[in-house]
């Protein structure tokens, strides 16, 4: 036996739990209004008893984590009761499920938070052309504010790390301009005619004759 409930099994169990509550209310309400025979009440109470036994034995073999998940869903269902609708009524009230499922409805602040997270992870220091980016169309079509920092894409931006590296590179380049290269220093050190250097000749220069 599994020690967890699939999504479908969890929904089934919630429906059973809801039906148990409805059956209990039905017995009390219908008998109060004299709309249920003694035998009918007996049959429904028997169903309630065996449904309770089923719920008890099932949950007793489930791990605590799975029970907590079920209880949270049950408490939420008590605040917002489970509604059972046929297909015709569901389409009238909620519209076509297949069509509605294709559209995700998110409040603007939540959507922009998701968009900024995507931009931060996907667009930082990006060099790709926007025409080859799948994220660009989503952001543009939903009017997400643009960065407009780089030429390749309106959503690409330069990170603080990249700015720091560029500044360090620029600084190093400026410092290197003021320094004499090793090759130049070596060449200068090997010059025959160094300034302020006296030479001793082992012959008499012609001009001295």
Image (cartoon, helix red, strand yellow):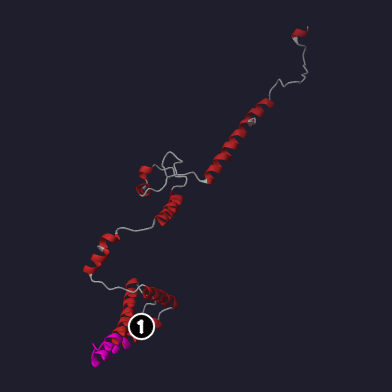
Relative to residue 145, is residue 53 depicted above or below? Answer: below
Residue 134 drawn at (x, y percent): 36, 48
Q: Is residue 123 magenta?
A: no
Residue situated in front as seen by the camera: 180 or 129: 129
Residue situated in front as seen by the camera: 183 or 32: 32
Residue 129 drawn at (x, y percent): 39, 42
Residue lying at the far bottom of the rendered structure? 38
Left or right: 195 as drawn, with respect to 144: right
Which residue range is magenta in the image?
A: 28-49
At a point 27% along the width and 73% down the height, the residue shown is 84
Q: Residues within 10 Å of mark 1 (few under 14, many from 20)?
A: some
Residue named by callout 1:
55
Relative to residue 171, is residue 95 depicted above or below? Answer: below
Residue situated in front as seen by the camera: 141 or 41: 41
Residue lying at the far front of the rendered structure? 33
Q: Quadrant of residue 164?
A: top right
């Amino acid at each position: 036996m599994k020690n967890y409930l699939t999504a479908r099994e969890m929904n089934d169990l919630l429906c059973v739990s809801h039906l148990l509550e409805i059956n209990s209310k039905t017995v009390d309400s219908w008998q109060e209004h004299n709309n249920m025979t003694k035998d009918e009440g007996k049959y429904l109470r028997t169903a309630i008893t065996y449904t309770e036994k089923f719920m008890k034995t099932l949950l007793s073999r489930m791990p605590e984590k799975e029970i907590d998940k079920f209880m949270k869903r049950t408490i939420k269902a008590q605040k917002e009761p489970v509604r059972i609708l046929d297909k015709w009524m569901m389409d009238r009230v909620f519209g076509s499920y297949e069509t509605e499922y294709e559209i995700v409805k998110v409040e603007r602040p939540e959507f922009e938070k998701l968009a900024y997270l995507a931009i931060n992870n996907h667009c930082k220091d990006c060099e790709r052309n926007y025409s080859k980016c799948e994220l660009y169309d989503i952001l543009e079509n939903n009017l997400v504010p643009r960065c407009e920092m780089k030429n390749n894409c309106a959503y690409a931006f330069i990170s603080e790390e990249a700015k720091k590296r560029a500044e360090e590179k620029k600084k190093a380049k400026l410092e290197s301009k003021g320094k004499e290269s090793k090759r130049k220093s070596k060449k200068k050190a090997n010059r025959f005619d160094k300034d302020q250097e006296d030479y001793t000749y082992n012959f008499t220069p012609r001009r001295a004759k």
